[in-house]
Amino acid sequence: MKQGRFVGGAMAAALALSLTLTACAGSPAPSGSAPADGDFTIAVVPKDATNPWFVRMEEGVKKYAADTGLNVFQKGPAETDATMQAQVIQDLIAQGVDAIAVVPVDPGALETVLKEAMDAGIVVVTHEGASQQNTMYDIEAFNNADYGAFIMDNLAEAMGGEGLYTTMVGHVTNASHNEWADGGVAHQAEAYPNMTLLEAEPRVESQDDGEVAYQTAKELLKKYPDLKGIMGTSSFDAPGVARAIEELGLKGKVFTAGTGMPAANKQILVDGSVSALTLWDPADAGYAMAELARKILAGEEIGDTVDLKVKGYEAMKFAEGSDKVLEGNGWVVINKDNVDSFGF
């Protein structure tokens, strides 16, 4: 059984502080003498406080607070910017929160500030940060390679299993987006031999911005007239690409697939610009991160199967070869028939 690493270096730092200073509201108590659950303060830090994806995540965070009575809240930067996100985390360290749950813009850019948090005895967990070193555990809603393969299946079906394609990520520094794209490309090589990755530009960046995705797709389609498909990862990618396809009169000739929010993309699903989108409910991810942080703070063992109290996260297992990355089974498919059933 794998043990929570909180009892390691971060806990030692917390105990040292408690012996030399007056009690600090943000320092977790040692296992066996943890404060009452109502005393825990857990902060969730998304990539961007205004992005609809993370607005939805906050709904799950608020539900967790209501369900448990814990002081759990979400606080993020005004835009998707790693430096701004690091400053939010720095502020939370100064406030003395008990736990910080982060969806990193750039895992590498956060290593220093997250180490500072852990050295201060603060529990740190992440989501979409499988490469993050300074975290106790990272939650992935699913196996990232499998999810990328699933997106590729959707793209391949639309393309008829043949033709030239490329991949799009929100940021080239985003660990999960690149793992999905890598998984999609690997799956294509095995399952769809008549599809070919665009060698000149195998991966482009949308900056997690629908307008950038749209403009980038237009440039690609004009530059490479044989391009038949674009695999998206960010929730802005496929919708932005679909807009470019429509504007250039290429509907039925060029195709896209990727992640997307239901209500925001109803029209492109209904009119056939995209046959299907995939996602996991960000509200569930927010809920699951908070529950994982609570378990660590309460001294509960993080074993071979972890129940984070939300659908798709009830039996989290460690990724192969990892004692840090926990994978669930949380993805869903959106199409024209079920787009109205999600409620967001």
Image: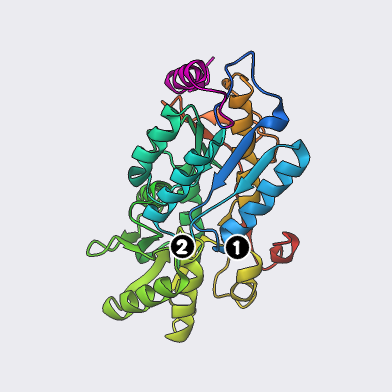
Q: Position of residue 9 (x, y in %)?
A: 42, 20
Pick out the residue farthest to the front.
22
Q: Position of residue 95 (x, y in %)?
A: 53, 40
Q: Position of residue 47 (x, y in %)?
A: 48, 54
Which residue lies at the image location 42% right of the left edge and 50% below the top edge? 87
Q: Disc 2 to disc 1, how far (Cα)? A: 19 Å
Give yes or no for residue 92 being in the magenta stretch.
Answer: no
On the rendered image, what quadrant is the N terminus found in? top right
Mark drawn on residue 181: none
Using the rendered image of the protein, determine whether residue 282 is visible from the camera's viewpoint.
Answer: yes
Callout 2 crowding tier (Cα within 10 Å): few <14, some 14–19, many ≥20:
some
Residue to which mark 2 is pinned: 79
Of 75 and 96, nearer the camera is 96
Badge 2 or badge 1: first in the primary sequence = 2
Q: Secondary structure at mark 2?
A: loop
**Residue interval drawn in magenta:** 1-25
Amino acid type shown at disc 1: Met
Amino acid type shown at disc 2: Glu
Report the side of 248 relative to 63 (left or right): left
Residue to which mark 1 is pinned: 261
On the rendered image, what quadrant is the C terminus found in? bottom right
